Amino acid sequence: MTAWKKASEELGELIGEAVSEYDVEFRKMFGSPVYFVNGNMFIGVHGDGIMLRLQEEDQQKLYEEYDEAAPFTPNGRRMREYALIPPAVYDDEIEFRKWLDISYSYVSSLPKKEKKEKNKKAAPKKAKKSEK
């Protein structure tokens, strides 16, 4: 198993600025900045890459346009709706905005995902003080 690489702070700042115009929610996942739309993951940083949620046909367009684009496969396991976008996309403001808009439109169309309740363990009961 490969070691988990810390998220690029520079890319985290880049996507934070890029998504500021969208209605998104910021969360950290495994120490990495990730943005959600209606509870559905939209975009995030993974190591020194940016992953973006796209429909299959949009992923194919991305792969056709950019040889460096690739399916998102953290720890060797492919996440079906996610692609790693290459620097040629996120270094070009117009191209980055185009792909963000495509992704945002798709993710916004998904049913709202409710937050799962964290499994809280019951606090240990305090022993009652005996009366004197």
Image (spheres, helix red, strand yellow):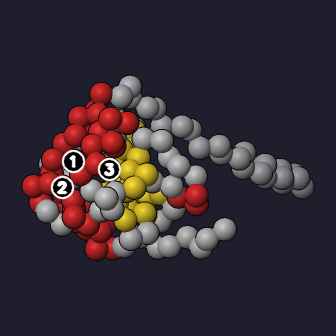
**Distance in Å between CA atoms under marks 2 and 3:** 15 Å
Mark 2 — residue?
Answer: 96
Please report the residue visible at 21 percent of the width from the left and 64 percent of the height from the top.
Answer: 88
Q: Nearer the viewer, mark 2 or mark 3?
A: 3
At label 3, counting other C-alpha atoms closer than 10 Å, the crowd grade (few under 14, some 14-19, many 20 or more) is some
Q: Is residue 46 above or below residue 83?
A: below
Image coords of residue 117 (percent x, y):
56, 38
Disc 3 marks a residue whose amino acid type is: Tyr
Which residue in the rendered view is the most extreme toward the left? Answer: 94
Element carrying mark 1:
helix
Task: Please state if 129 lies on the left or on the right of 113 as rendered.
Answer: right
Q: Residue at x 33, y 42 (%)?
A: 60
Q: Tell me the residue that label 3 is attached to.
A: 63
Cα distance in 3D space between marks 1 and 3: 12 Å
Nearest-to-viewer mark from 1 and 3: 3
- SS class of the residue under badge 2? helix
- In the rendered image, which residue does mark 1 sit on? 99
* Sequence-first disc among 2 and 3: 3
Kind of residue at badge 2 = Phe
Of 106 and 58, which appears nearest the observer? 58
| Contact check, label 1 and label 2, Cβ < 8 Å | yes
Q: Is residue 7 visible?
A: yes
In the picture, which quadrant includes the C terminus?
A: bottom right
Q: Position of residue 53 (x, y in %)?
A: 36, 44
Relative to residue 121, is residue 22 drawn left or right? Answer: left
Disc 1: CA contacts within 10 A as few (<14), some (14-19) or many (>=20)? some
Helix, strand or loop for disc 3? helix
Residue drawn where x is 30% and y is 27% of the image: 109
